[in-house]
Image (tube, rainbow, N blue to C red):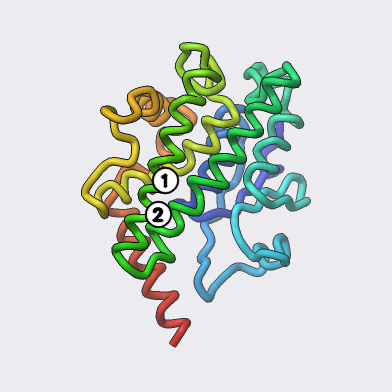
Amino acid sequence: MAGSGELKLLGVWTSPYVIRVRVVLNLKSLPYEYVEEDLGSRKSPLLLASNPVHKSVPVLLHGGRPMNESQIIVQYIDEVWSGTGVPSILPADPYERATARFWAAYVDDKVGPAWLGMVFTCKTEEERAEAWDRAVAALETLEGALGECSKGKAFFGGEGIGFVDIVLGGYLGWFAAIDKLMGRRLIDPARTPLLAGWEARFRAADAARGVVPDDADKVLEFMRTLLAWSASKAE
């Protein structure tokens, strides 16, 4: 187990990538210090020194040594604390482990850009609608993947939360905000019933409660603040 003060996480509360790391730390029952960063003009010296390439979150410091990129951090935590009494988030079987990594990469390759488009980069309603359609198509594919990977159980990881659950679950706070922004549901029970049930179970899990944002208005307020800052910077 990590000792007190051994783990420090630099993050932003809405970041899907930061949320992933917080969920896996909670799953492993690891104590850590969380430091909320300002990604505007006041990034901390610690963040800039710890991630000089991208200057972004999350950054996990373990014994003072930094590491970046959420999927890498999550797998690192799973490997280092493999004997904590909590099942590994990655399967022991090499084929199943490779499959989980494939679907986790799919989430970030397909869902991630669509989320960024709808929230931050799309300039017109037409562009936003196209990003919505891409997200829906990706989620429909993930509906099938959930059926196959879960083998009829609660999560992509089976009985418990696994790697794909953590990667996709990080986006759920933003999904609720996008639903409100667009006036329709990304994870629609009529279209993707398995994912709808999965979302409810993931949100209710102890590891995700209090970490995955549940106030869509607060997330949208954060989005508007960030967009206003970006606009002022561009002027």
Q: Position of residue 170 (x, y in %)?
A: 48, 41
- The x and y percentages for residue 146 are 48, 23
Label 1 element class = helix
CB under 8 Å between discs 2 and 1? yes
Q: Secondary structure at mark 2?
A: helix
Q: Which residue is mark 2?
A: 131
Instruction: Pick the quarter of the image with the C terminus.
Output: bottom left
Residue 76 in percent (x, y) is at 73, 37
Q: In the rendered image of this protein, does residue 158 appear above or below residue 214?
A: above
Of the pair 66 and 163, the residue shown nearer to us:
163
> Please, what is the three-letter code of the amino acid marked with disc 1?
Ala
> Which residue is rendered at x = 33% and y = 24% of the image?
193
Q: What residue is at 52 percent from the left and 17 percent from the top?
A: 150
Residue 46 vs residue 127, the one in the foreground: 127
- Give the residue at mark 1: 135
Residue at the bottom extreme? Answer: 235
